[in-house]
Amino acid sequence: MTKTLIRATGAALLGAALLGAAVLGAAGTTVQAQPRAVIELFTSQGCSSCPAADKLLSELKNDPSLITLSLPIDYWDYLGWKDTLASPGHTARQKAYSKMRGDREVYTPQVVVNGVLQALGSNRDDIENAVAQSRQKTSTLSVPVQLTLGDDRLTVTVPKANGEASAGEVWLCPVSRSVPVGIGRGENRGRTITYTNVVRRWIRLGTWSGKSENFSVPVDAIKSTGVDAVAVIVQGGSADKPGPMLGASLAALH
């Protein structure tokens, strides 16, 4: 069944490394990603510890088996610099992850790996260990998500369940692959920091219940200033109770 829609959630409803040469370009181009990890970095322009993590994420994006995403948060804005990329929804998502893990760990730079484990965002070894641990569940990223661009529409295909993964929510994220920001005040005053794969919006395409599903979205509804890529994730749970990553893909929109 094909569902044609474009429904953007508000911040309160917010509930993810381009894959080598996987690029959506010519009409009919298809990308089917089978990554080993989705890495979400919660970062802030007002955090003096974050630039090292931002740099590491820019390196990790070159690994074709990883989908790396920056999710700037807003809770350090009071320190003197308002983060120009931050979203209250990213803060809500980070807190929801903490609640689901039961550890109350909410900080920057924090990485959440495959929706289930957290690690220090500037520590490559910690991140790799979290990736390995999260892969112990066979359902992790077991659902191949396919993206097809044609006739000015993006079609997302989630196949029939084949294993433990059987239900989740399907989210589409317009992404800016590289965003340099000059910071005028706060702990990073005078620095220009480049942010990688910045998530600009979260669009809930619908639910996946283990049956093959197609979702069709107009490309014009995705693209806006600075948006040049798109990520799609299938994730267990819900926006306020996010679970493990079941499937994901990320590709350029040119």
Image (tube, helix red, strand yellow):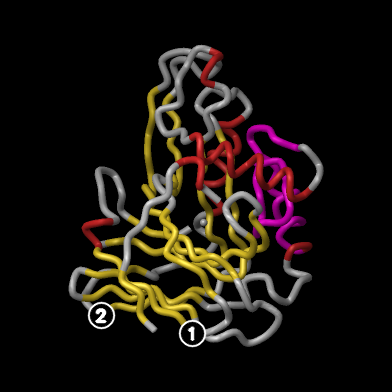
Q: Secondary structure at mark 2?
A: loop
- Find residue 242 and report its image quarter: bottom right
Magenta span includes 112: yes
Could you tell me the amino acid type at mark 1? Ser
Mark 1 nearby-residue class (10 Å; few <14, some 14–19, many ≥20): few
Q: Secondary structure at mark 1?
A: loop
Q: Position of residue 65 (x, y in %)?
A: 56, 67
Q: Is residue 114 left or right of residue 151?
A: right
Please say if 127 is above or below 65.
Answer: above
Q: Earlier in the sequence, mark 1 or mark 2?
A: 2
Quarter that holds the N terminus: bottom left
Q: Mark on residue 212?
A: 1
Mark 2 nearby-residue class (10 Å; few <14, some 14–19, many ≥20): some
The residue drawn where x is 71% and y is 41% is 120
Residue that carries the numbered disc 2 in the rendered image: 28
The residue drawn where x is 38% and y is 59% is 230
The residue drawn where x is 42% and y is 60% is 172
Magenta span includes 174: no
Mark in front: 1 vs 2: 1
Could you tell me the amino acid type at mark 2? Gly
Between residue 56 and residue 79, name the one nearer to us: 79
Please say if 118 is above or below 153.
Answer: above
Magenta-tinted stretch: 105-132
Q: Position of residue 235 (x, y in %)?
A: 59, 64
Please say if 95 is above or below 141.
Answer: above
Q: Mark on residue 52?
A: none
Please say if 150 is above or below 102.
Answer: below
Judged from this view, the residue extending furthest toward the right is 103
Q: Position of residue 49 (x, y in %)?
A: 63, 27
